[in-house]
Amino acid sequence: MSAEVLAARPAVIPTTLIRPSRGWSALNLRELWRYRELIFFLTWRDVMVRYKQTLFGAAWAILKPFLTMVIFYFVFDRLASVPTDGYPGPIFYFSGLLPWILFQEGVTKAGNSLVTGANLITKVYFPRLSIPLASVVSGLVDFGLSFLVLAGMMVVYRVPFSARLLAVPLFLLLALVTALGVGLWVSAMNVTYRDVGHVIPFAVQAWMYASPIVYSVNLITDPLWRLAYGLNPVAGVVMGFRWAILGGMVFPTTLVLESVLVSLLLLVSGALYFRRMERTFADVV
Amino acid sequence: MGEFAIRVHDLGKEYRLGALSSGYRTLRDALAERAGQITGRVPKPSREILWALRHVSFEVERGQVLGVIGRNGAGKSTLLKILSRITEPTEGEAEIHGRVGSLLEVGTGFHPELTGRENIFLNGAILGMKRTEIAAKFDEIVDFAEVPKFIDTPVKRYSSGMYLRLAFAVAAHLEPEVLVVDEVLAVGDAEFQRKCLGKMSDVAQQGRTVLFVSHNMSAILRLTHETLVLDRGALVLRAPTPQAVDYYMTSGLAQSGERRWTPDDVPTGASPFQPRVLRVLDDRGRVAERVACTEPFTIEFEYELAQEVTGLRIGLYLSTSRGEPVLTSFDTDDPRAFERHTARPAGRHVSRCRIPATLLNEGLFVLGVNASSFRIRSYFTDEHALSFSVDGTGAPGSHWPETRGGPIRPALAWEIGEAG
C-alpha cells in the first residue's frame, strides 16, 4: 500500500456503538450532513428517472402546470368568473401553481418515498431522513423549468421585473420547509399505515382548494376567518410568492408570519416523529 | 491482547408476530384496537413475541474472517441487520471499530432506467462511498464487471448476468474496515460465483474484518477459519469452521430417523402445502437413523394439501454432512408419473423413494425436502430436514479396512482378464 493511501487514512478509527434507543432522539443533523453526497445522488436519481423514456422528456415539467393553468383559466376565470384581484387570469393562476406544485409533488413523493424505497431501507443503513428530503428537493428542478415559463409570461403580460423578485428564494425555501414538514409526517405514517398512500392524492387535492390558487384571499373578509385560513401554511407561501412576482398588493404580513410559524412547527414535529418511528422502519415496511 | 473490530454483548431483538404476519397494519386495525381498549369490550390483543436473536455475545478480532451459519430463521440476517444499523436491537449492545460496509444484497438501489455509469455512482453512494472514491475506482469497477461497451446503456437492457456482475463489482470495491456480507454469492451462475468467491478471498487477505453469512457450506469452508452457529436466535457454537459445519449439518437435526412438522413450524406462505413427516425406513420398514449400505432403504415424505394443487412435485435433496450435494430427485421425474399426478386433490399424501442397496458410502448424510410447481411456485423447502448415517459394513471393498473417499460407493461391475 502506498504512503499516500496510508496518510489519507483517518488517524482515528471511528467507533460505532449500537444499542437500543428509547423515547425521542435527537435529529443528528451532523450525520445528515456527512451523508450529503447520498442526498445529492438520491435527488439526482429522482430527477433523472422522472422523465426517462418519455417522448417530451423534461417538457412535462412545464406542460403539467401550464395545462393546469389553461384549465383553471377556462373554468374559474371565463366560466365562473372567480375574481383574480385584477390580474390577468393566466398569470394569476400560474404564479400560484408554481409554489403549489412544488409543495404538492414534494408531499406526494415524500409520502410514498419510504415505501418505494423499502428495498434500500431494509438493506443499507443511512440517515432515513435523506429519502423524503431528496424527494422534496428534487421538485426544485421542475420548479426552475416552469419558472422560465413564468418569466416569459411576465414579459407577455408586461409585469415589471422588480427588486421584489429577490424574495422569491425565501418563499421557495418556505415552500420546501412546508412540504418537508408535511412529507416527514406522511412518509413515516405511510410505513406503518398504508392507508396514508390512499389518502394522499385526495388530501392534496382538498388542500389545493384550501389554498389561494384558483381564488383570491380577498374573498375572505372576516379578519378572524382570515386568521384561521392562514393556519394553512401554503396560503402564506402562495401569497408571498405572488407578491414577489406580481406586485401591486400589500405584503401579506400576517399570512406569511403564520405560514412561517406553522411550517417550522410542522418541520420540527415531523422530524421528531420521523426519528421516533424510523427505528422500526426496516422491520415494518 | 487481541484488538477487536466487533464486540457484541448480550444482543437481542424481538419481533411482534402479529405485526409481522399481517405484513402491515392498516389505520382501521389500530383504531379498532384503541376503541376496543377504551370501551373495554375487546381485551388488548396479546401479540406473540418472537426473539429473533437473544443473549448473543461474541468478539471478532481485527482482520478476522468469521463465518455465520444457521438455518432459516436462526437469526443470521437479524444479526447482520443490527450490525449494519439497518434495524435497532431490543437489548444489549454492539461496538464496532472502523467504518462498516454492509452487503446484504448486491445492486441495492440500482435503478433500471439509469445507465450502468449512473448506477455505479448511485449504488456506490448508497453503499457509503464518496464520489471521488467512486470516480477513482470507476475504470476498475467497469473492468471487473466486464461491461465497458454497455456502460452508457440503461441497466434494464442488461442481461441478468451483466446486471449481477456490475452490481457485485461496485460492492467488491467498497473499502471499509469492517465488511458484513450476507448470501451475495447465492446468485448468478457458477462462473460468476467463482469470481465472487475469488474476490471475497482477496478481501479476506487484505486484513479486513469480515462477517460472512452463507448457506453455501463450501464457500464458508473456503473463506473462513472460524464460524458461529446460530439456532433459533441463540449462539450455539463458535468453533473452527470444519467443526462448525459438521455440527450445523448434523446435530440439532432430528437423529431419530424421523422428522415431524406441526403447522407452527411451517411458514404461512407454504399454504396450501403442509409437510407432516419425513422418515427414513430400513429394508424391513422400520424407522431407522442408521441404514446399512448393503440394504436398500426408503425415504418417505407425508404431507397434506388444503386444496387441490396442480403440477406439484416433491423433491428430495441428499447431501453430505459437509454440504456437498449428492443427488436431487423429484417424485414426478418419470414423465408418466407426472401425467398421472398432474393434479393432486386436497387431503393427505405420501411420496416414497426407494434408495437401492450399495449406493451410498458410509458416513453422515443430510436430507432436504422441497414441494414446488416447476417455475410457478415453491411452496416449501427445508434443506436440512433430517440426517441419517450409513453403515458401511459389508460394503464393496470393506474387507480392506480403509476409508473410501466420496459420498457414493456403488458395487460396480469389474472384469479381470488377460489383456489380449
Image (cartoon, rainbow, N blue to C red):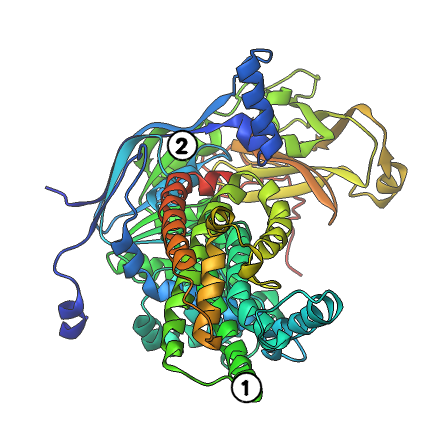
Q: Residue furthest left?
A: B1
Left or right, residue B102 beside residue A33: right
| Chain to which mark 2 belongs | B
Q: Nearer the viewer, residue A14 or A66?
A: A66
Residue under pointer 1: A152
Residue B188 visible from this viewpoint: no
Secondary structure under the numbered disc 1 in the rendered image:
helix
Q: Which mark is residue A184?
A: none
Under mark 2, the amino acid is Leu
Q: Quadrant of residue B137?
A: bottom left
- Relative image position of residue B252 (x, y in whole percent): 46, 24
In the drawing, does residue A206 fall left or right of residue B200? right
x and y percent of residue A256 in the render?
Answer: 40, 59
Q: Quadrant of residue A260?
A: bottom left
| Image depth: mark 2 or mark 1 in front | 1
Q: Which residue is mark 2?
A: B230
Residue at 13% of width from left, 73% of height from top? A3
